[in-house]
Image: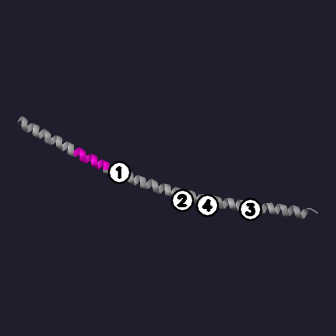
Amino acid sequence: MTFKEALDHGLQSAVTWIVVGLLGGIYWLVRRVFTNQKQIESLQKSLEHRDDQRARDMNEFRSSFKRLEDSQKELREDVKNLFQRRSP
């Protein structure tokens, strides 16, 4: 093998490694972007679910609090009525 053939073979190997490296880098980048996109979509769905759950919990809390206030008002009225009946 002559020096020119060895140099030619070495250049072909170098070019091959550069092409393989570039293709591998592009593949990694595409996978990374798609993977991140899937993770972002998953996180968005999770946040939407949490927001919905929080809204339901707040509505339930408000409803319970309203019932508690109503019960308290009824109790006050009952106590007032009780004392009004007892007083001469």
**Residue 33 badge:** 1
Residue 86 in the image: state x and y as whole percent: 90, 62
Residue toward you, 1 or 76: 76
Q: Residue at x 38, y 51 (%)?
A: 36
Q: Residue at x 22, y 45 (%)?
A: 20
Give the CA distance from mark 1 to mark 4.
39 Å
Q: Which residue is mark 4?
A: 59
Question: Tag 2: residue type?
Answer: Asp
Question: Tag 3: residue type?
Answer: Ser
Say if the magenta span includes residue 22.
Answer: yes
Give the CA distance from mark 2 to mark 4.
11 Å
Residue 38 in the image: state x and y as whole percent: 39, 54
Q: Is residue 5 left or right of residue 21?
A: left
Residue 40 in the image: state x and y as whole percent: 42, 53
Earlier residue among tags 2 and 4: 2
Q: Is residue 65 left or right of residue 39?
A: right
Indicate the quadrant where residue 80 lies: bottom right
Residue 6 in the image: state x and y as whole percent: 9, 37
Quadrant containing the N terminus is top left
Element carrying mark 4: helix
Earlier residue among tags 2 and 1: 1
Q: Residue at x 61, y 60 (%)?
A: 59
Earlier residue among tags 1 and 4: 1
Main structural element of the magenta stretch: helix, strand or loop?
helix
**Residue 52 badge:** 2
Give the CA distance from mark 4 to mark 3.
18 Å
The residues colored magenta run: 20-29
Earlier residue among tags 4 and 3: 4
Earlier residue among tags 2 and 3: 2
